[in-house]
Amino acid sequence: MLTNAAQMDECWEKPVQPRMVRPYMQANGNLRPLAAEQGRAINAVESVVLDILGIEIKWTPDGRPFPPTVLEAIKQLYAIYGLEDGWDSYGGKKLDLAVVEPTLKLIFAGHQRGYCPRLIPLSNGGVGLRWEANGKEIEIDVSVGGAFEITVEDLASGDISEPRAGNPAEVHRILELVL
């Protein structure tokens, strides 16, 4: 288990942007360890329900490989989950499980547009999602209590905007506009 920010850097500093838009899902060797960890065998013709930190995800194979970038983002989420209180030497809190569902929804929403984020832990127990796409850097912080902070930077001009979103649906609309 990784316990400090220096060790965690290698988990979330790697970009996970796909080069192929929408590489769809199929049971394969990449997903088998996650399913095996949950005591499930993957059958290529049946739906599989995966429990990811208490959130159930239903996946139905359709002949295409499971997106490796989504799997990488899920691995990053598990790495963040492995951090204990004080992980950043400043009293950083461990992952609050209430942020897992909105984080997963944002991972899949980004994937549907051809991009998966890097994930970083937030000191308040939340998760930061980072994308670089279409000449923009997008940051969405999912904080404990359901708050979202969004920053969009145009990499060419350096212009920064901070759109406000009061609920998950508004966050998804903003993500659709910028990805």
Image: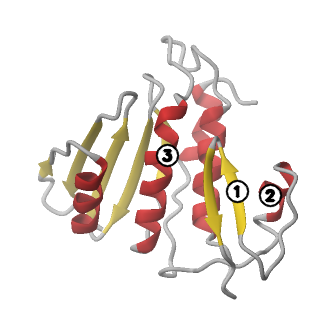
- Residue 30 at x, y percent in the picture: 77, 66
Q: Looking at the image, which is closer to me, 114 or 166? A: 166
Residue holding disc 2: 35
**Mark 3, residues whose alpha carbon is within 10 Å: few (<14), some, or many (≥20)?**
some
Residue holding disc 3: 101
**Mark 2, residues whose alpha carbon is within 10 Å: few (<14), some, or many (≥20)?**
some
Return the disc, 3 or 2, that comes first in the chain's sequence: 2
Q: Amino acid at mark 2?
A: Ala
- Mark 1 near mark 3, Cβ–Cβ under 8 Å? no
Q: Amino acid at mark 3?
A: Glu
Residue 89, located in which quarter of the rendered image?
top right
Q: Secondary structure at mark 3?
A: helix
- Residue 146 at x, y percent in the picture: 34, 34
For residue 159, above or below residue 48: above
- Mark 2 near mark 1, Cβ–Cβ under 8 Å? yes
Check residue 50 in the rendering and tell me which mark sits there, or answer none. Answer: 1
**Quarter of the figure that contains the N terminus:** top right
